[in-house]
Image (spheres, grey):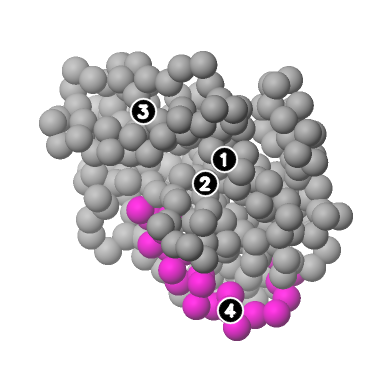
Amino acid sequence: MSIGKYPLYHKKISAKLSKEHKQTVFWFKGGDLSERKNVVKNDDIISSSNKIYSFIKNKKKIIFFKWCIIYYIKSSKKIEKNKIKKKYKSLNDQNSHLLEPICTDWDDNTKLNVSSDLFQSKDIDFNNPYGSLIELLVTIANMQVGLKKIHFKKGWLYHGWLSNISNQDIFIRKKLKHWAWITFPLDIKKPKNFSLIKMISDVMQVIPKSGIKELKAIGSKRISFLKSKIHGQDLEALIYLRNQINSKIKFSFENLDNEEKKLLKKFRII
């Protein structure tokens, strides 16, 4: 589990950005991943979402919405050379990276970008069968004025130097020792096979026993979808979302294959 005070809600920055851009902004500090220990990304997302719930329930309309967790990651050269700690202050610094669980597009205020991370946390709650994060998305989407499209994409870190690296999860696990930092794509179709061991084979030799245990715990939740006879487990949540959100709002997805497109069309999600 993640330890320490992070993610820390930055009230001043949130208020300043909200006022300057007439937005609803929730800005959290995720700290320096080179210094934090055993960070679990989903723990940070759930922890930060608790702050948002208390605010959203008192709102009626939203024009722009940004939920961001800013992390600092030194380049691999700085890590290896063990240089003196540096303070990073803005996104202009290439060591600053943003995780955006739910965020109005920076260039298009009619588009809402949604991270696949929201589908990874399923609460055991009869009232929220697909998890509280999915319910939060429904609430925000129905409150946002002028929303035309919801775009689902993989939960990468953006805007910093690591955004240009295709295997950023491997870097965070191997170089920074956050063994349970995993970004999954949406499970729309049932894959032919899935192996947690194969997925983390590149770092198996250096993962401590405690890390392996935690990875297996996370992986076991994802393996559960293999019990499905037909589809991946996130397809059901997407059908639920489609039924809960204004039908005029279009859904789009990052990197779909032909089989996934057919399933989404079949269930009238796209």
- Residue linked to disc 4: 57
Q: Which residue is mark 3?
A: 171
Q: Residues within 10 Å of mark 2 (few under 14, many from 20)?
A: many
User: Which of the two discs, 3 and 4, labels the residue nearer the N terminus?
Assistant: 4
Image quarter where the C terminus lies is: top right
Q: Amino acid at mark 4?
A: Lys
Q: Where is mark 1, residue-wise?
A: 234
Callouts 2 and 1 close, C-beta under 8 Å: yes
Q: Position of residue 217 (x, y in %)?
A: 28, 38
Residue 172, image x, y percentages: 34, 33
| Mark in the foreground, 3 or 4 | 4
Residue at 43% across, 42% down: 95
Residue 54 within the magenta-colored segment of the rendering: yes
Q: Earlier in the sequence, mark 1 or mark 3?
A: 3
Marks 2 and 3, Cα distance to the nearest angstrom? Answer: 23 Å
What residue range appears in magenta? 43-64
Cα distance between the residues tagged 1 and 3: 26 Å
Front residue of 162/6: it is 6
Kind of element beneath mark 4:
loop
Identity of the amino acid at label 3? Phe
**Tag nearer the camera, 4 or 1:** 1
Q: Which mark is residue 119?
A: 2
Q: Are marks 4 and 1 in contact (CB under 8 Å)?
A: no
**Residue type at the position of mark 2:** Phe
On screen, residue 215 above or below 23 = above
Which is in the foreground here, disc 2 or disc 1? Answer: 1
Give 72 or 151, whichever is nearer the viewer: 151
Which numbered disc flags the more N-terminal residue, 4 or 1? 4
Image location of residue 255, percent across then percent down: 67, 27
Query: In the rendered structure, which amino acid carries the disc numbered 1?
Result: Asp
Q: Decide if residue 139 is on the left or right side of residue 29.
A: right
